[in-house]
Structure formats: C-alpha cells, structure tokens
Amino acid sequence: MQRGKLLVISGPSGVGKSTTIQGMLTKHPDMYFSVSATTRQKREGDVEGVTYFFKTADAFAEMIQRGEFYEHAEYAGNCYGTPKEPVERRLGSGIDVIMDIDVQGAMQLKEKCPDAVLIFLVAPCFSVIEKRLRGRGDTGEADMEKRLKKARWEYEMAVHYDYIVLNDTKEHAVEAIDSILTAEKLRAERQTDLLKMEESL
Ligand code: ADP
Ligand code: 5GP
C-alpha cells in the first residue's frame, strides 16, 4: 500500500487557509485534517477536537515533554502543535493528510518528513489579507496587529515552499491544491508498479 500524502498549508492569518482546506475536505471526504493543539482562546465557530484541541499552557508543556508533537511553534503569543500519532497512523494506512500550520512549523516538518508537500497560500494583493481578517470579525485589534506584522515575514518565507497558490476564489484555490495532490501522486517513484514488463502468472 502507498503511504498517504501529507499536504501542509501555510499562509498569513486571514488569507483563507481554513476555507480552502474545508473545500479540499468536501472534495475528498476520506482525507484527514490534522487537528492541532493550541493554547489560544476559542473563537466563535471553534469546536473542541474538530478545529483544535484547546489546552492550558501547562497541559501543552506536558505534551511537549512527552514528545507528542511532530512540530510545535509560538504564533502571535500562543502555542500551537501538531500531534504526531494521529497523523502517522493515517499516513501509514494510505490516507492523505492535510494540515494548517505556520511557517516555523512547516520548516520543522520539512526536516522531519521530507516527502511532505509544502503549499503557501497568497491573496490577490497584500491589502486583501487585512480586509479578509477584519471581515471575519473574530480577531481583536491587538491580535490583528500582531498577525498583520507577521504576514510580511511570512510572505518572505514563501520561497522555501514547494508551491505557491493564489486564493483569489475558493474554487480556484481548491482546484490548484487538488492538481498538486494529483501530480504528487503521479510522481515516478510512486508509480514503479506500472513499469513491470512481465505478466505475473
Ligand atoms: P485563515 O484560515 O487563513 O486565517 P479563513 O479561511 O478563516 O483564513 O478566511 C478568512 C476570511 O476570508 C473568512 O471570512 C473567509 O470567509 C474569507 N475568505 C477566504 N477565502 C476567500 C476568498 N477566496 N474570497 C473571499 N473571501 C475569502
Ligand atoms: P489561528 O489562531 O488563526 O487558528 O492560527 C494561527 C496560526 O497558527 C496559523 O498560521 C496556523 O497555520 C497556525 N497553526 C495552527 N495549528 C498549528 C500547529 O499545529 N503548528 C504550527 N506550527 N502552527 C499552527
């Protein structure tokens, strides 16, 4: 059985990562969304165990000590981490995994899991990021400032990704990510079975 593909989606806060990932999950109901642990406060629409596992700082630190994370990072004053076991289990069973993690986390993952596919999502122009973030209406002014400041550095880091996808419309972005998944699955190293020249009896 082929190992599942791991798609890592990053991009500034408000660029549309959750929206695009939701589109991919609708298209691929068997795909697994990696639910991260975080110390940040729940926002409207967050569901424990579905969008995140919400942890206290102490509980998060214990998870780090027990080595439960694939990667973890601090973002805008809160901690975020990817639980290792659920992701490994799915990939090992041939299930594709999609995750929404920040640039620092993605760089750690690339080291640990070189066949992960790193995708950076951008908006049609930089000012649209702020518009979308404000439009979502769930981020306080101080938090917004931190996130927008970070967005500039994140754009600079995008050159380290495998792909850059424009989220002008949700449909285009989902189609582009779906094409990447298709192409990655057709890579020669995954297709050697098709090169057999002898019929097996
Ligand atoms: P992120 O997960 O990157 O923080 P979200 O997916 O929450 O971003 O999107 C931020 C806001 O932008 C949401 O209100 C969402 O509905 C909106 N949005 C996402 N993608 C698009 C798009 N292609 N066009 C217009 N609005 C979008
Ligand atoms: P938000 O608070 O808007 O849900 O997420 C803030 C940032 O944290 C986003 O850039 C998101 O990609 C990132 N993030 C979410 N989960 C993880 C994770 O498990 N690890 C890392 N490194 N970043 C994460």
Image (cartoon, helix red, strand yellow):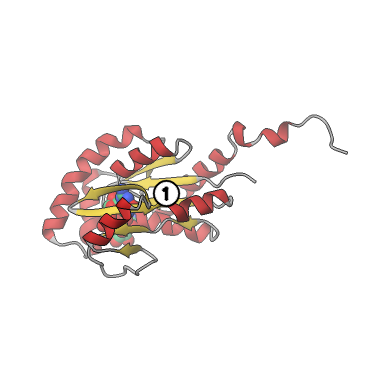
Residue 65 is left or right of residue 194, and the answer is left
Which residue is rendered at x = 39% and y = 35% of the image?
111
| Nearest to the observer: residue 199 or residue 82 | 82
Residue 148 placed where, x, y %? 18, 48
Residue 164 appears in view: no
What quarter of the picture does the C terminus occupy? top right
Q: Secondary structure at mark 1?
A: helix
Which residue is rendered at x = 37% and y = 36% of the image?
161
Residue 136 placed where, x, y %? 25, 63
| Nearest to the observer: residue 143 or residue 155 | 143
Residue 120 placed where, x, y %? 36, 42
Residue 102 is left or right of residue 185, and the answer is left
Task: Decide: is 186 above or below 133.
Answer: above
Residue 145 is left or right of residue 163, and the answer is left
Residue 184 appears in view: yes
Tell me the quarter of the picture where residue 3 sits: top right
Is the residue marked by circle 1 packed among few (<14), some (14-19), or many (20+) residues within 10 Å?
A: many
User: As drawn, which residue projects farthest toward the front?
Assistant: 66
Which residue is rendered at x = 45% and y = 51% of the image?
98
| Nearest to the observer: residue 137 or residue 98 | 98
Residue 102 placed where, x, y %? 30, 47
Does the residue tagged 1 have its C-beta within 8 Å of any atom of ligand 1?
yes
Which residue is rendered at x = 61% and y = 36% of the image?
190
User: As drawn, which residue projects farthest toward the left?
Assistant: 142
| Nearest to the observer: residue 19 or residue 147 | 147
Say what amino acid the circle numbered 1 marks: Ala
User: As drawn, which residue projects farthest toward the top?
Assistant: 197
How many callouts does the rendering have? 1
Task: Decide: is 94 above or below 140.
Answer: above
| Circle 1 residue | 173
